[in-house]
Amino acid sequence: MSADLPQFISVGKGDSARKIAVRHDERGAPGVLWLSGFKSDMLGTKAEVLCEWTEKQGLTCTRMDYSGHGESSGEFVDGTISKWLEEAVAVFKQFCKGPTVVVGSSMGGWMALLLAKALSEIDREIDGSLTGMVLIAPAPDFTEELMWKHEFTDEIKQEIMEKGRFERPSEYDDSPYVITRALIEDGRKNLLLGEPIITNCETIILQGQKDDAVPWQHALRIVEGMAHDDVVLTLVKDGDHRLSRSEDLDRMIAAVAELAQR
């Protein structure tokens, strides 16, 4: 099984410094990096199943919690896409030393695409390489395209702008998601769907057609944006947002295995 206890790395400086929890199991190549979703952590079902599979295959596995999530320091309400991306880049640079397949779920899909963009800009500074991505119900640009443009009423938008936050009920947690003005405004600095998405690797997308959080049409926009790279989209007719049923988990593992063998 995976590392019982996480190790911590420091990301950021001064008042913005935070301790990021990482579970890293060094084995063989290629490695697999797991990126969780919004308000999810690295001990979720999909992450655990993926880690168990890598152990059986003798592959390196790396997982992390964004600040304000899971075992990492910080408050969730202080998080932004830019902060969480900075943490993902730091983890990749420190732990992913060889060919790596990145697996991103929901917001983790946005993080994976942003990570690919960031790594292409700092190529000479890293030892690892991104060789493939598996995106599960990926949600790039969700703060703008899904929340601001479609979900939030004018009253909610006004509350966010004037009070700086809105408490959004969660279907997956007893406590609400606090959506901050900083999250929305920072999200606009990280939008991807309005321009070509370049990953320089093969990507497999798994998307449920009964996903009530990320419409399956959102995945089509991602595919259209990735015109320069190989991408395969699998639509699961009865799949929900979590895609955590046994058959969904099998699809995830099959996708990772396919890319790991390239």
Image (cartoon, grey):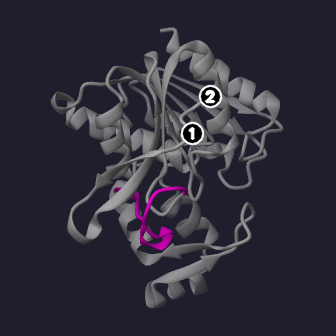
- Can residue 196 be seen from the camera position used here? no
Q: Seen from this angle, which residue lies furthest bottom?
A: 162
- At label 2, the amino acid type is Met
Horizontal and vertical percent position of residue 144: 49, 63
Q: Which mark is residue 1?
A: 2
State the CA–CA distance, disc 1 to disc 2. 8 Å
What is the chief secondary structure element of the magenta stretch? loop
Q: Residue 91, percent across and down?
A: 35, 41
Marks 1 & 2, CB-CB < 8 Å contact:
yes
Secondary element at image label 1: loop
Above or below 81: residue 116: above
Task: Locate residue 54, reporting x and y percent.
Answer: 58, 21
Q: Position of residue 18 (x, y in %)?
A: 34, 61
Quadrant containing the N terminus is top right
Is 149 within the magenta?
no
Can the viewer see residue 247?
Answer: yes
Which residue lies at the image location 43% right of the left edge and 67% below the top edge?
A: 74
Magenta range: 70-82
- Please report the residue visible at 72 percent of the width from the left and 45 percent of the height from the top: 242
Name the one closer to the observer, 159 or 14: 14
Q: Residue at x 29, y 36 (%)?
A: 93
Disc 1 residue type (three-letter) = Asp
- Residue toward you, 236 or 260: 260
